[in-house]
Image (cartoon, helix red, strand yellow):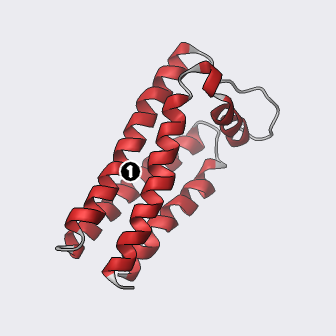
């Protein structure tokens, strides 16, 4: 895959998934805007039964922080794809792969421990969206 194609792929995935999800989580810190995230949490703690909530203040602050970090990570991926990858694709690739694998191992392990095992295959799909173009460059 040409580096230019990988750049387009990474920018699209970071914009939609990382920045989009990050903003969705951050906005869910405001209770009237938390419906979609509440549903996602209920889905992750299968079965869908309405038992989960993101209404507690301590949950809302974690949504705000985690959403901001996720959106910021998406901006970082976008910037690496835009500014570093064209001139030094090997370095950009190494930075992104290490970052993605660190996220995947920690997020998936802790999701499993927390009882939200269904997040592991979701994480694997998310990971593949990014690793695929990086490995094919």
Residue positioned 26% across, 60% down in the render: 80
Left/right placement of residue 87 relative to residue 65 reads: left
- Res 9 quadrant in image: bottom left
How packed mark 1 is, by other alpha carbons closer than 10 Å (few <14, some 14-19, many 20 or more), is many
Pinpoint residue 87: horizontal percent, then vertical percent. 17, 74
Left/right placement of residue 100 relative to residue 37 reads: left
Pinpoint residue 113: horizontal percent, then vertical percent. 57, 40
Q: Is residue 54 visible?
A: no
Residue positioned 37% across, 53% down in the render: 102
Residue positioned 64% across, 41% down in the render: 116
Residue positioned 68% across, 42% down in the render: 44
Pinpoint residue 65: horizontal percent, then vertical percent. 41, 29
| Circle count | 1
Pinpoint residue 133: horizontal percent, then vertical percent. 42, 75
Q: Quadrant of the C terminus?
A: bottom left
* Position above or below: 8 against 121: below
Q: Which is nearer the eye, 55 or 19?
A: 19
Q: Quadrant of the N terminus?
A: bottom left
């Amino acid at each position: 895959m040409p580096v230019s194609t990988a750049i387009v792929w990474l920018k699209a995935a970071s914009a939609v998934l990382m920045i989009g999800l990050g903003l969705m989580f951050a906005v869910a810190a405001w209770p009237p805007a938390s419906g979609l995230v509440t549903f996602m949490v209920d889905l992750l703690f299968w079965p869908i039964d309405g038992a989960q909530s993101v209404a507690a203040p301590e949950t809302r602050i974690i949504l705000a922080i985690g959403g901001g970090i996720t959106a910021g990570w998406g901006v970082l991926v976008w910037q690496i794809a835009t500014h570093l990858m064209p001139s030094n694709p090997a370095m950009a690739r190494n930075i992104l792969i290490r970052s993605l694998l660190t996220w995947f191992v920690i997020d998936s392990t802790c999701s499993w421990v927390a009882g939200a095992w269904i997040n592991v295959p979701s994480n694997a799909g998310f990971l593949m969206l990014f690793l695929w173009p990086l490995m094919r460059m």
